[in-house]
Image: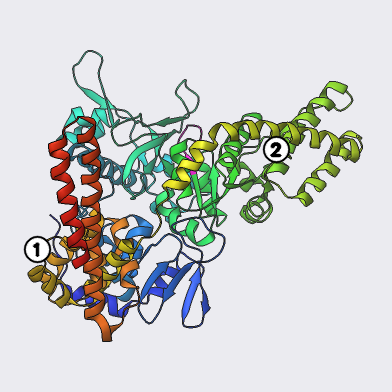
Amino acid sequence: MAQKIPEEIIEQIRSKADIVDVVGDFVQLTKRGRNYFGLCPFHGEQTPSFSVSTDKQIFHCFGCGAGGSAITFLMDIENISFQEATAKLGERVGIHVEISSTPEHHTQPISPEEGRMKDAHAFAAEYYQHLLLNTEEGEQGLNYLLQRGFTKEEIETNGIGYSLPHWDSLTQLLTRKGFSLEEMEQCGLIIKREDGSGYFDRFRSRVMFPIRDEQGKIIAFSGRILDSGGEDAKYLNSPESPIFHKGQVLYNLDQARPIIRKERNVVLFEGFMDVLSAKRASVFNGVATMGTALTMQHMTKLKRLTDHIIVCYDGDKAGWEAARKAAEMLHAERINVEVAVLPTGLDPDEYIQQFGPEAFKEKVISEPQAYVAFMLMYVRRNKNFQYQNDVLQYVDEALNYLVEGISLIEKELYIKQISMDTNISEETLQLQLRQKEAQIAKGSKRIEQQVLPKTEQLTLQKKKITATDRAERSLLAHMLHNIDVVDRIRQEESTNPFVRDDYMAIYIHLIGFYEEHQKADYQRFAEVIGDRELRKIIMEAALVERDPNHAEEEISDCLKQVKKFRIEQQIQDKNHAIKEAEKMHDMRSALQLSQEVIDLRKSLSRV
C-alpha cells in the first residue's frame, strides 16, 4: 500500500494552486464573466462547454459531465493516481510530497511479474546510458549520435544509451541484481542459448533507444547498429512480450500527451527516429508506431486526446502507400486527418538535415494537405495523362473522394483541379459526380431500410431523466454539502436511500469519507474516488441548485419519490408474476399476488 499523504499537506497544495493555471497547460481557455471556457479535453466537441471556476476552484464540462478539482483534473488528463497528481501539483506550488515508487493504482493494474520486467528495463536503460556517456567503450556510440545532430541534453532527456559488444554483460548484471533470467527472456532483454546452457544479451554493440508506455515506464528498446557492413539488421527491436505489444504502443505518447492536448493536434510519424528529429524542429507533439501499421488500438488512444491528426510519413513509394492507408483509416473514424507531404525519397530526418529544422516545421508540418487534396495527389501519382486509361482511372478514383464529407465549395475547387489535370470539362465532371452520388444515396437508402428498426429501438432505449433521477441527484447534492443529512438518513431510514447502483456506491463511499474527515468537502471527496464515472456523478450533483431555506422539505420530497419508485417497481413485478401465474393456471397464486398489489397501491397513496 502507498503511504497516505497528510490532509494538511493536501490542503496546503489545494489552497496554493490555481486551477486556471493547471488546466491552462492543457486547454486553451477564454474568460467569460467570472469563469473561463474552452473545448473539453475529455471528449471531442466544436462548441466550448468546458468551464473552469476560479471562485470554486473546480472544472466542469456540461457536455460529458467531467468535473472536479485541480488534482482530479491531473488524475484524469494524465491517467495517474491521486498520490501522483498531488505530488505533481505540489511541485508547481513549491511543496514537496514524498510518494512511494509503486503507484496507488492504475487503470490497468500490472502483475508482479510485469512490474519486475519494467524494473529490469529501467535498470538496463540506466546501465546503457552510463556506458554511452561515461565510458571509453561508449564513445563510438556517442560520436555517432553527435554526428547525427543530437545534443547531450537530448541524449539524457530521451534516455539514449549504448550496449557493449560483449555477449553477456547485461545478463551478468541482471543476475547479480536478483532478476529471474526466465522473466528477462520473456520480456526480451536476453535470449536463451539453443543448447540450454545459459543466456546471452539480445542487444550488443548498438545505440539503445528506450520505448516507454503511456505512464513513462520503459517497456522495450530499439537498438541501432553502428557497424552496418554485416548482415545484422540496422535496427533491432524488442520482441512482443507481456509488457510490450507493438500494436498498442505509440512512441513518445507519454511526453507528447500534454502538448497534444494544448495544441489540439498530433503529428503521426512512421518511426521513432522521426519523432526525435522532429523535436529538434520544435515539433513536440509527435508520436510514432513501433514497426507496425496503424491499428485500431493506436487510433483509440489518439482519439482520447484529439480529433485532429497530421500524418507525416516518408516521401518514398512505401511511405505514400502507408500514409494513404493511415489517412483512410483515420478518415473512416471521422477524425480530421491531414497529410504533411515530404519531397520524393526523403524521410523527416533527412529533410531536416538537408533543409533545416525551421523549414521542416514551417513548410511541412505547418502546411499539411487536407485529406481529399492528399488523396487526389495519391491517385494522380504514376499516371500518364497521355493515355486514355490513366485519365479514366484517375477521374473515377478522384471523384470517389468528392462524394461525401466535404462542402460544396471544396467540391467545386477539386472539380476545377481535376478538370485542369485532365482537360475534361467541369460540366462533364459535375454530371459524373452526381451519378456517383445518386448510386451511393440509393445504396445508403437500402441499407437504412434494413437497419432502421434497430435504430428506432436504440433511440427508444435512450434513457430520459425521470423524476426519480432528479430526486436521487438532489438528495446526493444535499449529502455532499451537509454531513448531518447523511447522519440523519442513516438513523431514520430503514432502506437504502438510492435505487441506482452507482449512487448507492457513492453513498457508501461518502459514509466512510465523513467518518474520517468529519466535515463536508465534495472536492476532497471526489479526489478519493478512483472511478472517473462516479466522479462525474459527484460533480454533477454537487453543482445542483439547492434551497438552503427549504432543505428539509427538499430532502423529504426526494426520499418520498424514491420510496414511490420502489413501490411502483414492486407493483410492476407482481403484475408480471400474476400474468405468469395465470398462464400456468395457478389461480391461487394469482389471487394472492393481486391482493399484494392492492396493498401496495394503498401504501403508495400514503407516501
Residue 323 lies, in percent from the top left, at: 61, 36
Q: Which residue is mark 2?
A: 375
Residue 316 lies, in percent from the top left, at: 65, 32
Residue 552 lies, in percent from the top left, at: 21, 80
> What residue appears at the point 45 percent right and 51 percent down from the top-left corner?
304
Question: Which of 272 and 350 lies nearest the eye of the viewer?
Answer: 272
Question: Does residue 41 sit above or below 414 in this rendering?
Answer: below
Secondary structure at numbered mark 2 = helix
Q: Is residue 256 left or right of residue 135?
A: right
> What residue appears at the point 36 percent right and 57 percent down from the top-left corner?
78
Label 1: how many Cα within 10 Å (few below 14, some 14–19, many 20+)? few
Q: Which residues are magenta?
A: 288-294
Q: Earlier in the sequence, mark 1 or mark 2?
A: 2
Q: Which residue is mark 1?
A: 494
Residue 601 lies, in percent from the top left, at: 21, 58
Label 2: how many Cα within 10 Å (few below 14, some 14–19, many 20+)? many
What residue type is disc 2 on? Met
Question: Which of 112 and 504 lies nearest the eye of the viewer?
Answer: 504
Magenta segment's dominant SS is loop
Residue 228 in sight here: yes
Question: Does residue 373 sit above or below 514 in this rendering?
Answer: above
